């Protein structure tokens, strides 16, 4: 397309933002600039590109694209979601305090407790579904408020706008891990958050074929810091992975629509099944966060957790599935299913898992874009083995 796509709709921006036709050839697909360095025109004069850790045109296209979709100032792409989250935590200094949702991604919990606590940082693990709890946890040294909503795998919903107001009042930046919703359904910066982060490995890529992370800052101040962290710490996303994520995002809107329709059908089916003790999905009317989620997002997504009562039942069920793949990760076109207690959340201590409700019978499914009838038939035949 010609002109600036940034004024246009979400699906148009998903396809075009950050990706004008290649200036030298007109290629409509951003080339993979597989180069480590760039020749200078003359000493002291370069074309805006010096060295691939600092700039790469394929990565820049992805960063501009995600910044546009999240309504932010600028995007920064990293080698993984965890590398992006690590970069955000460089905003805090020794002695600072962070308030985090008690039920974040297991890897985030591990990073904060097993690595960052060694640097004289303190973390409060809070049930952020209540704004009163957030308010009560804030201290003079709180610099970051780190939220995930809905959480993984308990699907707890937190009020992004309310949390961001509390953060601002205490001089803390509000960060939202928006991996589960993608910018198609939820845009935290529009609700007042300061930084949004994604594991691009999940819905942004959408095809389970690359690892990556992207963060988007609302303002120039933090954006400049993150560019400096990319250059200085170096965990940047490579050109080929940047290309794969860009390619994935072109269909983000259509994939999310389909994930949503199929996700709702699967959740409704599980909800009525006599082998299933309970279903956690914000799209169900009896979910405690149903109303709040609807007020801040335009869809419920494709992540569903459900309890089969025991480890034995979960194992029998998971081993019997034929269409769904037993695998970590989520957000791909293929349906992935896992047991959080032994897989994604194995690094969370058992007592804490029990407190959070992550039982051994809990199963989490990331509904793909296959035919709903095939997925439901697969669930039914595996549930029948229990
Ligand atoms: C997967 C995931 C991460 C970590 O991302 P990686 O790309 O695996 O490093 C962080 N947050 C959430 C919610 C995730 O699902």
Image (spheres, rainbow, N blue to C red):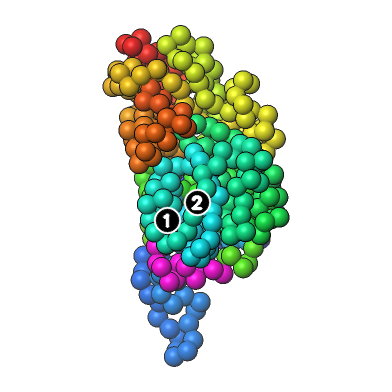
- Tell me residue 89's x, y (percent): 49, 59
Q: Residue at x 68, y 29 (%)?
A: 291
- Tell me residue 297's x, y (percent): 64, 37
Determine whether the residue tagged by mark 2 lies in a helix, strand or loop.
Answer: strand
Label the magenta part by its dominant secondary structure.
helix
Label 1 packing within 10 angstroms: few (<14), some (14-19), many (20+): few
Judge from the rendering whether residue 158 lies leftward or rightward of residue 313; answer left or right: right
Q: Is residue 234 above or below residue 330?
A: below
- Residue 123 is labelled as 2
- Tell me residue 363's x, y (percent): 40, 26
Find the magenta span and give its range.
Answer: 224-237
Q: Is residue 233 magenta?
A: yes
- Residue 242 is labelled as none
In the image shown, does 163 or 296 lie closer to the viewer?
163
The residue under label 1 is 117
Q: Residue at x 48, y 36 (%)?
A: 152
Q: Residue at x 44, y 71 (%)?
A: 231
Q: Is residue 227 magenta?
A: yes
Give the quarter of the figure containing the N terminus. Answer: bottom right
Q: Which image quadrant for residue 186?
A: top right
Q: Is residue 47 above or below residue 153?
A: below
Q: Are dots 2 and 1 in contact, CB under 8 Å?
A: yes
Looking at the image, can residue 356 be seen? yes
Q: Which image quadrant for residue 368?
A: top left
- Tell me residue 193's x, y (percent): 64, 51
């Amino acid at each position: 397309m010609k002109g600036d796509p940034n004024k246009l709709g979400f699906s148009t921006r998903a396809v075009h933002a950050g990706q004008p036709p290649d200036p030298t050839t007109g290629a409509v697909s951003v080339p993979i600039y597989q180069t480590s360095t760039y020749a200078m025109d003359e000493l002291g004069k370069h074309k805006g590109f010096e060295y691939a850790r600092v700039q790469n045109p394929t990565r820049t296209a992805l960063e501009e694209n995600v910044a546009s979709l999240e309504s932010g100032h600028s995007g920064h792409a990293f080698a993984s979601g965890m590398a992006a989250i690590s970069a955000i935590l460089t905003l805090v200094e020794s002695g600072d305090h962070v308030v985090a949702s008690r039920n974040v991604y297991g890897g985030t919990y591990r990073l904060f407790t097993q690595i960052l606590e060694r640097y004289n940082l303190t973390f409060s693990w809070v049930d952020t579904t209540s704004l009163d709890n957030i308010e009560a946890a804030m201290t003079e040294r709180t610099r970051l408020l780190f939220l995930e909503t809905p959480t993984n795998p308990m699907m707890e919903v937190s009020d992004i706008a309310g949390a961001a107001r509390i953060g601002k009042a205490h001089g803390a930046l509000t960060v939202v891990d928006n991996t589960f919703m993608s910018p198609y359904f939820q845009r935290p910066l529009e609700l007042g958050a300061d930084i949004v982060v994604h594991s691009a490995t999940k819905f942004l890529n959408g095809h389970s074929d690359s690892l990556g992370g992207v963060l988007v800052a609302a303002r120039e101040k933090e954006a400049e810091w993150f560019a400096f962290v990319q250059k200085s710490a170096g965990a940047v996303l490579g050109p080929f992975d940047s290309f794969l994520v860009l390619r994935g995002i072109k269909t983000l809107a259509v994939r999310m629509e389909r994930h949503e329709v199929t996700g709702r059908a699967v959740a409704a089916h599980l909800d009525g099944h006599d082998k299933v003790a309970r279903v956690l999905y914000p799209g169900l009317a009896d979910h405690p966060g149903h109303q709040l989620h609807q007020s801040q997002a335009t869809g419920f997504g494709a992540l569903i957790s459900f309890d089969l009562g025991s480890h034995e039942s979960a194992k029998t069920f998971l081993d019997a599935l034929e269409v769904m793949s037993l695998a970590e990760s989520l957000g791909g076109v293929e349906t992935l299913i896992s047991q959080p207690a032994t897989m994604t959340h194995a690094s969370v201590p058992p007592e804490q898992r029990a407190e959070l409700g992550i039982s051994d019978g809990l199963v989490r499914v990331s509904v793909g874009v296959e035919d709903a009838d095939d997925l439901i038939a697969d669930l039914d035949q595996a549930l029948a083995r229990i």
